[in-house]
C-alpha cells in the first residue's frame, strides 16, 4: 500500500453533471474540476453518493476518472461502488490504471448483507487489487449496508486498507475509529459535514465534503481556521455550514448541491427524479437564499488568511 501523497484536508465530493438524456457531461465535469482545484481544495472525490454513480454505465465512470486525473491539479479519489464484488474490482483496476490517488469502496448496495459478508467482500477486494492500490473503506449507511464500527476496526487492523471515509455522522463512531488510529495509523476522513468541525478539531485527517462542491470557499476556510485554532472564525463558518446542511436535507440527495453548482454557472443537469410541486417551490426559495448566503460565506472566508 503506498504511503506517499497523504490524503488529508478538504476533498470535495463532486457532483456528476449530466445531460438531459442522462449521459455524463464530461465537458462540464472538467470545468468543475478546474474550478474546485482553483478554489484551494486538497483533492476531489468522484463518483460517490453526491456523484450519483449508480446512474452511470461502466464506460462513463471509467472515462470520467481517466479524464479527471489527467486534468486535475489536485489528487483524485475514485468511487468504485458497485452491487457486486466483480464490478467493484473492475472499476477499481481502471481507476488505478488511470492514476487515481485512492479508491473509495462502499459495501455492495441494494441487497442486505451481514457483517461477515461485508468483511469477506473487503478482504477479497483487497486481495484482488494487491499492494499497488490505496483503498479506503466507505461507510455510508444512509444509502447502503452499514460497515459496523467493529467491522471497520477489524478491517483497518489488517493493514490492507489506507483508511476510512465514515459518512455515518456518528461522533461516537468517529471517537472509536480515532482511538484505533492512535494505535495503528490510518487515514480517518469524515464523510458527513454535520460533525466535521468537531471531528477535525479532535484529530480527523480531513473530510470528503458534498457541501464543498457548492461552496469550496467555506470548507477551505473552515479547515484553515481549525488548523490555526481561530475559535471565533470556526464558530461562524461552521454555523454557515449547518445552514446549508439544513437546506440540503430538505431535498433528495444531491439536488441542492447540483442546484448550487448551477447557480454558480455549471450546467449540472436535471435531478435524477422529478421534484414535486412543493419541492419545486422550495427550490426557488433555496436559489434566492443561496446567492445571499454565498456572498456572506465569501466575505467570511476572506477573513481567514
Image (spheres, rainbow, N blue to C red):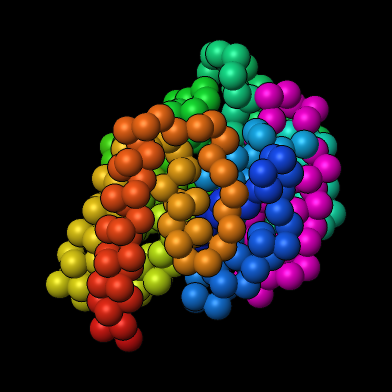
User: Residue at the location (44% across, 33% down)?
Assistant: 275
Task: Indicate left or right for 228 with 160 as reference.
Answer: left
Q: Is residue 198 among the parts visible in the rendering?
A: no
User: Residue at the location (56% across, 63% down)?
Assistant: 266
User: Foreground: 90 or 46?
Assistant: 46
Task: Tell whether position 65 is magenta.
Answer: yes
Task: Tell whether position 15 is magenta.
Answer: no
Q: Residue furthest left?
A: 232
Task: Indicate left or right for 63 with 202 as reference.
Answer: right
User: Foreground: 198 or 49?
Assistant: 49
Q: Is residue 84 among the parts visible in the rendering?
A: yes
Task: Indicate left or right for 91 with 166 as reference.
Answer: right
User: Residue at the location (45% across, 62% down)?
Assistant: 263
Q: State the count of labels.
A: 0
Question: How far across and how far down the image is residue 45, in percent?
Answer: 59, 54
Quadrant housing residue 250: top left
Give the vertical position of 197 relative to 154 (above or below): below
Question: How far across and how far down the image is residue 203, in percent?
Answer: 34, 58
Give the vertical position of 230 relative to 4 (above or below): below
Task: Indicate left or right for 183 with 243 as reference.
Answer: right
User: Residue at the location (15% across, 72% down)?
Assistant: 232
Quadrant housing residue 221: bottom left
Query: In the picture, which quadrant includes the C terminus?
Result: bottom left
- Magenta residues span 58-87
User: Foreground: 242 or 151?
Assistant: 242
Question: How far across and how far down the image is residue 163, in percent?
Answer: 55, 48
Question: How far across and how far down the image is residue 276, in percent?
Answer: 40, 30
Amino acid at each position: 500500500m503506498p504511503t506517499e501523497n497523504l490524503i488529508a484536508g478538504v476533498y470535495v465530493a463532486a457532483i456528476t453533471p449530466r445531460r438531459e438524456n442522462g449521459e455524463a457531461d464530461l465537458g462540464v465535469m472538467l470545468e468543475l474540476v478546474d474550478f474546485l482545484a482553483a478554489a484551494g481544495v486538497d483533492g476531489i472525490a468522484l463518483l460517490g453518493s453526491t456523484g450519483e454513480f449508480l446512474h452511470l454505465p461502466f464506460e462513463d465512470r471509467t472515462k470520467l476518472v481517466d479524464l479527471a486525473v489527467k486534468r486535475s491539479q489536485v489528487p483524485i479519489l475514485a468511487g468504485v461502488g458497485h452491487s457486486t464484488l466483480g464490478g467493484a474490482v473492475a472499476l477499481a483496476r481502471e481507476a488505478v490504471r488511470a492514476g487515481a490517488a485512492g479508491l473509495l469502496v462502499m459495501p455492495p448496495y441494494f441487497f442486505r448483507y451481514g457483517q461477515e459478508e461485508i468483511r469477506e467482500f473487503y478482504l477479497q477486494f483487497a486481495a484482488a487489487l494487491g499492494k499497488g492500490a490505496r483503498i479506503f473503506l466507505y461507510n455510508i449507511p444512509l444509502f447502503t449496508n452499514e460497515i459496523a464500527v467493529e467491522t471497520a476496526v477489524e478491517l483497518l487492523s489488517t493493514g490492507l486498507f489506507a483508511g476510512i471515509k465514515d459518512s455515518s455522522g456518528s461522533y461516537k463512531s468517529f471517537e472509536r475509529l480515532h482511538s484505533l488510529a492512535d494505535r495503528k495509523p490510518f487515514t480517518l476522513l469524515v464523510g458527513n459535514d454535520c460533525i466535521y468541525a468537531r471531528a477535525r478539531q479532535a484529530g480527523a485527517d480531513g473530510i470528503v465534503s458534498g457541501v464543498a462542491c457548492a461552496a469550496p470557499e467555506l470548507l477551505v476556510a473552515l479547515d484553515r481556521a481549525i488548523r490555526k485554532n481561530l475559535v471565533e472564525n470556526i464558530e461562524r463558518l461552521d454555523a454557515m455550514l449547518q445552514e446549508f446542511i439544513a437546506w440540503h436535507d430538505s431535498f433528495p440527495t444531491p439536488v441542492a448541491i447540483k442546484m448550487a453548482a448551477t447557480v454558480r454557472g455549471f450546467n449540472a443537469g436535471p435531478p435524477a427524479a422529478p421534484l414535486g410541486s412543493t419541492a419545486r417551490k422550495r427550490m426557488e426559495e433555496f436559489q434566492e437564499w443561496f446567492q445571499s448566503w454565498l456572498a456572506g460565506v465569501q466575505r467570511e472566508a476572506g477573513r481567514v488568511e
